[in-house]
Amino acid sequence: MSVIDDLAALQDHDGIIRELEQQVNDIPIRRNQELEKIKVEQEDYERAKEVVQTLRTEVTRGELYSAELKETIQKFRIQTPSLKTQAALDAMMSQISKAEGDLKAAENSVIETHLKIEPAEKYAEECRLRYEEAKAEVDEYIADLDARFAEVKAKLDKANKERLEKIRPLNVPATKKFLMYYERLRKNRWPVVIKLVDNVCMGCHMELPPAKQQDARKNTALANDPGKMAIVACDFCGRIVY
Ligand SMILES: [Zn+2]
């Protein structure tokens, strides 16, 4: 195995790692996008439930108020016979009349509000069904994504461990400079090790002087003596060429 072969093997492996890393980054984004999709349905359903609850509270409050008014009217009626003057009687009658008016308004309001509950409940139920349906679909997809994520993550962990094996043959004094060069460049250039075809770097597609091809060939001839090999790199993009 020449240095170039070892680098190419490491690069192949890093290609797999890059792909897995990409997926590890992408899956959570897709997961959020899915959840975002049912947000509208979820909010509609929450709001519809709130409307029903508000109407019910309003009815309960109206009924309590009506009961209080009835009690007040009852009390007034009990007091009436004991009133001594016409003025007191008139005042009492006026209070009763006002309370009766209030009672009628309160009861009407309760009836009106009560009538709104059923349609509101119906709408909330429609919203619930829409939400549940959308959620079922998304839940299934999210379960798939979660399973996929766990699988990809396990593969990535394994690939990262295996990478140490790919580095080992290069991590010796004679070839360490190649490894360091590769490690430095791979963050910004991919792939790092690339073929020269008719003097053209296949990484950046720039034409290099013929001497570059000769240097690369010289390297190949020195494959069994890596200490004497030089890093032959593209003048334009810095990739290791062979
Ligand atoms: Zn290049």
Image: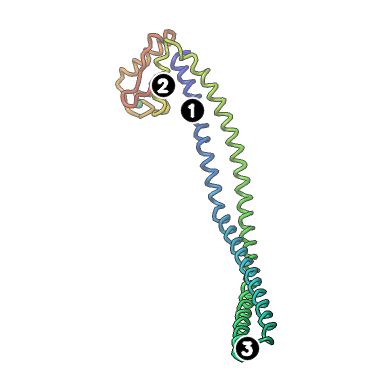
Label at residue 182: 2
Label at residue 89: 3
Residue 102: percent from the left, percent from the top?
60, 79
In the figure, is residue 95 to the left or right of 191? Answer: right
Mark 3 surroundings within 10 Å by alpha-carbon count, few (fewer than 14), some (14 through 19), many (20 or more): some
Residue 23: percent from the left, percent from the top?
52, 35
Check the image and name the residue furthest to the bottom: 86
Q: Amino acid at mark 3?
A: Leu
Of residues 189 and 64, which is closer to you in this image? 64
Residue under pointer 1: 15
Quadrant in the rendering for residue 176? top left
193 vs 137: above or below = above
Q: Secondary structure at mark 2?
A: helix
Disc 1 versus disc 3: nearer the observer: 3
Of residues 70 and 137, which is closer to you in this image? 70
In the figure, is residue 124 to the left or right of 9? Answer: right
Of residues 46 and 61, which is closer to you in this image? 61
Tell me the CA gap for discs 1 and 3.
98 Å
115 vs 172: above or below = below
Check the image and name the residue furthest to the front: 84
